[in-house]
Each structure stands twice: as structure tokens, then as C-alpha cells.
Image (spheres, grey):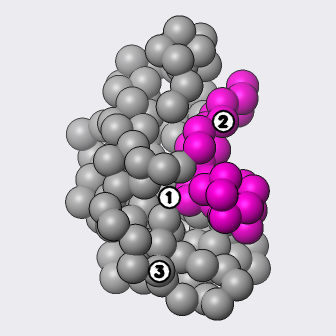
Amino acid sequence: MLPSRAVERLLQNLPQDLQDLVLELRNIIAEVAPGATEIGSRRGFTYFYKERGGPVSAGVCQIALFEDHVCLAFIHGAFLPDPKDLLQGENLYKRFVRLYSYEKAPWDDLRDLIIHSSRFDPYTQQFRDLPI
């Protein structure tokens, strides 16, 4: 995970509610995908398994920062189980969930999406049985 100071710099222009949302997403990702690499940029955070490839071939998810919301995006989102129909997007594979507040975020469902994404192997289009 990135150092706290780097995370604070990336989040400094977001409203506090969205900062809290991002921090909770980061906590969930660290819990369910502890081996994932985190990269930060001015646009947000990217998570992937370096030993399996790069941000696309081994992508877990991305947290994109916007002025009034946060997007939790999945590069292989079209393959993820989504019983609550949370995922949006017209891209061939990539899907995302727009989140506008910490209180209204569907935390259990987001956690499930992150778990499934962390286990997805795009080469076989199967879910690996990785430890949580």
C-alpha cells in the first residue's frame, strides 16, 4: 500500500465524505486482496497482482476520484457476478459503480465484487480459488 502521506495528497481536494469512502474501499481491498499492488495517480488508485501481470491482465480494481463522486471500476467487470445490478458501463469488459456518499454505499456488495475480481483470471475466464 502507498504511504499515508501520498494517500493524503491524492485525497486532499475531495470532500471529507468521499475521502472516508475511498479509505474504506482501500481497507476492503487490503483485506480481500492483500497481495495486490497499489499505484496512485492524480486520478485515483489502481490495484493489480504484479506477479500475474499488469494493471489490465491482473487487474483487481480501480478507484477513480471525481469532484462529486468516486468510481469503483473493474477492468473485467463484465465477467463478475452482479446480482444487485450495481455495475454500469458500455465498454466491452470494463464496468464501474458510482459512489456518492459513504452512508449510501452498498458495502457488502462492493466487498463481494472486489473478492470476485481479485479471483478472476482473464486468460481462462474462471475464478481462482485464492485465499481471502
* Nearer to us: label 3 or label 1: 3
Which label number is shown at residue 97?
1
Secondary structure under badge 2?
strand
Residue 121 placement (x, y as % from top left): 60, 79
Residue at the limit of the structure toward the front, as seen here: 51
**Hey, what amino acid is under mark 1?**
Val
> Would you say the residues marked 3 and 2 are in contact, meaning their CB atoms lie under 8 Å apart?
no
Q: What residue is disc 3 on? A: 128
Residue at 67% x, 64% y is 52
**Hey, what amino acid is under mark 3?**
Arg
- Upstream in the sequence, badge 3 or badge 1? 1
**Label 2 packing within 10 angstroms: few (<14), some (14-19), many (20+):** some
Question: Disc 1 and disc 2: Cα gap in Å?
Answer: 20 Å
Residue 125 placement (x, y as % from top left): 61, 88
| Residues in magenta, as a range | 37-64
Question: Disc 3 and disc 1: Cα gap in Å?
Answer: 23 Å
Q: What residue is disc 2 on? A: 39
**Hey, what amino acid is under mark 2?**
Ile
As displayed, is residue 22 above or below residue 128?
Answer: above
